[in-house]
Amino acid sequence: MVARHLISLDDLSDDELHDIVARGAEPSRSRPDSPLAGKVVGIYFRKTSTRTRTAFSAAALRLGANVIAFGPDDLQLNTGESSEDTGRVFSRMLDALVARTADDPEEMRAWADQDRMAVVNAMSADEHPTQALADLTTLAGRFGEIEGLRILYVGEGNNTAAALALGLTRYRGTHLELRTPPGYGLTQDIRERAAKLAASSGAIVHEQHDLDDLSMFDVVYTTRWQTTGTTKPDPHWRTVFAPFQVTTELMDRFPDAVFMHDLPAHRGEEVVAEVLDGPRSIAFDQAENKMHSAMAVLEWCVAGNGAVVLRLRKIVPFVPEDSFTVPDLRDPLDLSAKEVRLFTRFFGLDRITTVGPLSVVDILLAAGEEALGGTDRSLVRYVVHAHTVQHIVPPYLRHMDTVREKLGLDDARAFTMAHQSCVTGLYALKTVEALLRDEPPGSTALILIGEKVVSSVMQHIPNTTILGDAAAAALVSLDGPGDTVLGLAQRTLGQFHAAGDMTPEQQGRYHESYVPALAAVMRDAVQDAGITLDDVSLVLPHNVNRFSWSETARLLGLPLTRIYLENIPRMGHCFSADPFVNLATARAEGATTPGDTVLLASAGQGGTFAAAVVRTGEDHG
């Protein structure tokens, strides 16, 4: 597993950032004993630090790592050795380096130009990413959810403010109001980056240079006026900053707000003692959360070196032998001759599978029974049906009770997942991974993916694809043999939620957005895995049609031969089951072998997209 670096919050996908924050906000969550046992973490601080240095040192030790600390006078950098050579030596001996330079982050970028040692920015001149993660962790712990929170930041637009702006805008509906002294606001670069993130998430970032016209806020946040490692050329700067002190009068304007401060604090300057030490202050909770957040950061950076990952112990497809040709479906689907030619010649469809008289429960049981063969069924904690169509059977039938009973999974909890269209199967991996983290070692879960076409409306997406019947079963755990899930990503373009009921104008925008969004979520999954697309040997897609994957391959710069399209003419598009069926058939045909890195990807109506990076294990047999 290659190392993953955190130099800027830009190095994290939305999913990664949210996951780190969620992990930090639940310090008592289940994790393996000493997940970083045998690892060595270097702590190199050129500038003073109390909280960040202690937080990362304590975090590394609590995770089982050994720690080596370096001060500004401890290295041969002081005698003329180059920073590049220092980084190269570090990377041969350390598993992670947590560094505070308070200088340009490019030095850390140079140290990160290797894949053996993770590099963490504990503060540079332009950004303090680990502070923002600790702040977000504090907000999540205090409020439960970050989405929709309103934060008033008062003070200098420094690296703490910059990181907060880049982090908070990753959450929908948040509002960050910055009130900064004239001449001491955010840089133009940070404003533009935060605005771009806000446009995507629906957040608001606004800055002005007074304390007028303030609405209600959930949080008031400040930081000390003199940032670590910096000086201010204006000898009268304190006069400029004086109106931006957080006082009891300011806090009284927001009776339900809490107060945050990244510390150290200078009482009487940026904040009065009555606020910092008062009952509404959570500044010292915020300081403690630096350690919890640092543990989550180190786990992420050294993922694959002792961190918990999901294993696909068995993938079993159920693909019926019977099928229709596309021309066979011309009358049932009311297809024109032109549409038949479109689907067959241009989109690459040929045969569309059908299970005939079998029910959806029948095909789930067939796949599930084979996946469970030879296993201890008492260890199965969850059995999940991931499906595309929301109402797969009448609700009163409670089909998952039947499935659980017939599979002999008396100790398992059963439920279904939908609302993510054809990406529900991949999304279920993330859900089940989270559930298994709170179960005893050795616990497993059975994910059943699939459905049966029951109407022409369900089978035919005009100008896009024709759907068939199939299913897959995935037996998964957090340990043991099998394929290893290295990265997961999911995106939703909510403006297209109406799916088949979109207006022609919305449909046009959706078609324009489809390939870029699919390519983006694939890149997100690859980034989450800490690899590049060049490391992916084969893409295992949903079988929507050949043309859309040709366009996606072109956008990603991938040869079409690296996308497994063989099942498109064999079976058509079989809802959420496609990537899992493709993984199984590609393995059976020798298209992928143990140790390969493959990328499963899917898109669904309603603007849903998901991808998973998987390292294949031994043949599941």
Image (cartoon, helix red, strand yellow):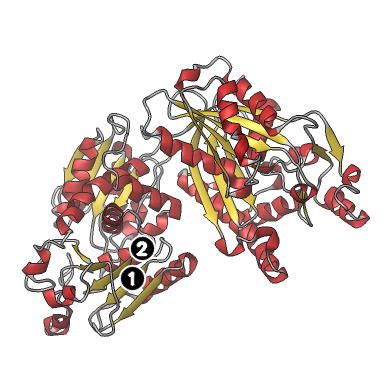
Spot the residue most to the right: 337
| Image quarter hosting the C terminus | top right
Lateral position of residue 384 relative to residue 128, left or right: right
Mark 1 and mark 2: Cα distance apart in space: 7 Å
Helix, strand or loop under label 2? helix
Marks 1 and 2, the one that precedes in the sequence: 2
SS at circle 1: strand
Q: Nearer the viewer, residue 246 or 454?
A: 454
Residue 173 left/right relative to 547:
left
From the viewer's side, name the closer residue of 83 and 132.
Answer: 132
**Picture coordinates of residue 62 (x, y %)?**
22, 36
Q: Residues within 10 Å of mark 2 (few under 14, many from 20)?
A: many
Front-lying residue, 91 or 310: 310
User: Where is mark 2, residue-wise?
Assistant: 168
Left or right position of 259 against 443: left
Residue 70's x, y, as percent?
A: 17, 46
Task: Name the residue beneath numbered marker 1.
Answer: 176
Residue at the spot 80% in from the left edge and 32% down from the top edge? 356
On screen, residue 20 above or below 407: below
Cβ–Cβ under 8 Å for marks 1 and 2: yes
The N terminus - image quarter: top left
Q: Is residue 562 above or below residue 343?
A: above
Place of residue 257 in the rendered image (x, y in percent of width and height, measured from the top left): 23, 67
Q: Residue at 72%, 52% (x, y): give it.
A: 550
124 and 293: which is toward the camera: 293
Instruction: Say what amino acid the circle numbered 2 marks.
Output: Leu
Q: Residue at x 43, y 30 (%)?
A: 478
Q: Position of residue 501 (x, y in %)?
A: 69, 62
**Mark 1 Cα shell of 10 Å, populated few (<14), some (14-19), many (≥20):** many
Instruction: Kindly give the residue lying farthest to the front in the view shown.
Output: 396
The amino acid type, in three-letter code, at marker 1 is Leu
